[in-house]
Image: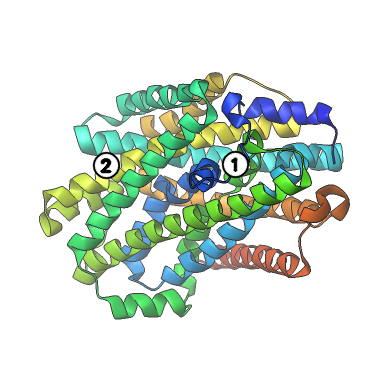
Amino acid sequence: MPGSAQQNTASETIQSSPESAVSRRKTPHEAWWFLGPAFVASVAYMDPGNFATNIEGGARFGYQLLWVLLWSNAMAILVQYLAAKLGIATGLTLPENCRAEFSRPVTVGLWIAAEVAAMATDLAEFLGAALGFYLLFGIHMLPAAVLTGVCVMMILAIEQLGFQWLERAIMFFVGVIGVSYAIEMFLSKPPWPPILKHVIVPEIHSSSIYLAVSMLGATVMPHVIYLHSALVLPRREPLDREEHHHRKMELLDVLLAMNGAWLINSAMVVMAAAVFFGNGIHVYSIEAAHDTLGPLLGKFAGVAFAVALLCSGLSSSTVGTMAGQVILQGFMNFRISIFLRRIVTMIPAIAVIAWGLDPLKTLVLSQAVLSFCLPFAMIPLLMLTRRKDLMGLHANRPLTNVLAAFATFIILAMNIWLLAAIVTGKS
């Protein structure tokens, strides 16, 4: 395993505290103690980019693209588990492992791709939170963006109390989003037979490939692959038997968090299909979706939608900032204040708002960019986790390698199909 000198940098990224010493006592609360890292990562799987792609997908194509979410979620479970396993086995984040194992040019290339992914997702998350403030309180987008930045820095400051305090705060936001969409599902009263059919039976056309790839990019997020490998470190103990136990608990964490995110994403598509597609209503913006829900389902539906969007934007923007910190420190061995990074990365989102660009189109485009960046995270992750000299007993089994390679191939194939559709004008 890598040396302890390198491990110190990882521990600085996600702050450790006295509570990071794992108690080996078998109590009913033990599993709860391990829950958290995957839920933090799962926030990125239900961020405002998901709102944009899921609502547009449901409004334009009904339930047709629900299968994309199912398969995307399966990929998400796999890659997030591998990322967590890498951190548990090596004591280093994915970016730190890349810096240690790959050449300098390759590391710089991977860092650039990771930063592009982080910027794309940060734009989506920041826009979403600002839209949430606008829809709920009528605050104009520019001051709402500044308010978003302040709120995110306040949430980030919670980590000073201990890493689990921040994790529980994020889990609270996830719970609010889930409850909000449970309400939307109840109010929209969707027909279940076509939903079940399209969850299971794949169907895609050239006209829907752009949205399908965007939904994939919005569901399997490159920046939280990097982050998840860091989030597990405060709970890590460098003993084989403890690592094995930690890995099993993290698998439970991943299964609960990712399947929860899948249900919420599916609820977004179902709601949009039932309310907009089912009534022949064309929705071209998130504001229009919010304004249309009120007359059709009642004012409470619009409020639940805006609350979910605001919680999604604030929590995912917090997580995105944390991921950016892990990326910069891990690949380039360079650290800046997380609050300074938050201020700097606000600039693109504020520029988009100031120029009056369409938030929905910007959000969907950002998710397509994320899908193109995803292989640059998945391929190194697969290369590293299959190595027994690095992972020891935690190295991937042959079936895991096959599944991960297949998932990477599917993503590359969909990206190539999207490029062909764009070139031929069919997207």
Q: Earlier in the sequence, mark 2 or mark 1?
A: 1
The total number of labels drawn is 2
The relative height of residue 238 versus residue 162 in the rendered view (above or below) is below
Left or right of 51? Residue 230 is right
Res 329 quadrant in image: top right
The relative height of residue 337 versus residue 119 in the rendered view (above or below) is above
Disc 1 element: loop
For the point 30% across and 31% down, which residue is it? 141
The answer for how far apart the CA atoms under marks 2 and 1 are is 40 Å
The relative height of residue 258 versus residue 91 in the rendered view (above or below) is below
Mark 1 neighbour density, 10 Å: few (under 14) some (14–19) many (20 or more): few
For the point 65% across and 41% down, which residue is it? 114
Residue 86 in view, yes or no: no
Left or right of 7? Residue 348 is left
Q: Nearer the viewer, mark 2 or mark 1?
A: 1
Percent coordinates x, y for residue 400 in the rendering: 71, 65
Percent coordinates x, y for residue 374 in the rendering: 63, 52
Mark 2 neighbour density, 10 Å: few (under 14) some (14–19) many (20 or more): many
For the point 68% across and 38% down, which residue is it? 236
Whether the residues at callouts 2 and 1 have beta carbons within 8 Å, the answer is no
The relative height of residue 370 versus residue 97 in the rendered view (above or below) is below
Residue 376 badge:
none
Q: Which residue is mark 1?
A: 25
Residue 250 in view, yes or no: yes
Residue 307 badge:
2
For the point 11% across and 55% down, which residue is it? 295
Percent coordinates x, y for residue 412 in the rendering: 65, 63
Q: Amino acid at mark 1?
A: Arg
- Give whichever of 277, 182 is nearer the camera: 182
Percent coordinates x, y for residue 359 in the rendering: 37, 43
Q: Amino acid at mark 2?
A: Val
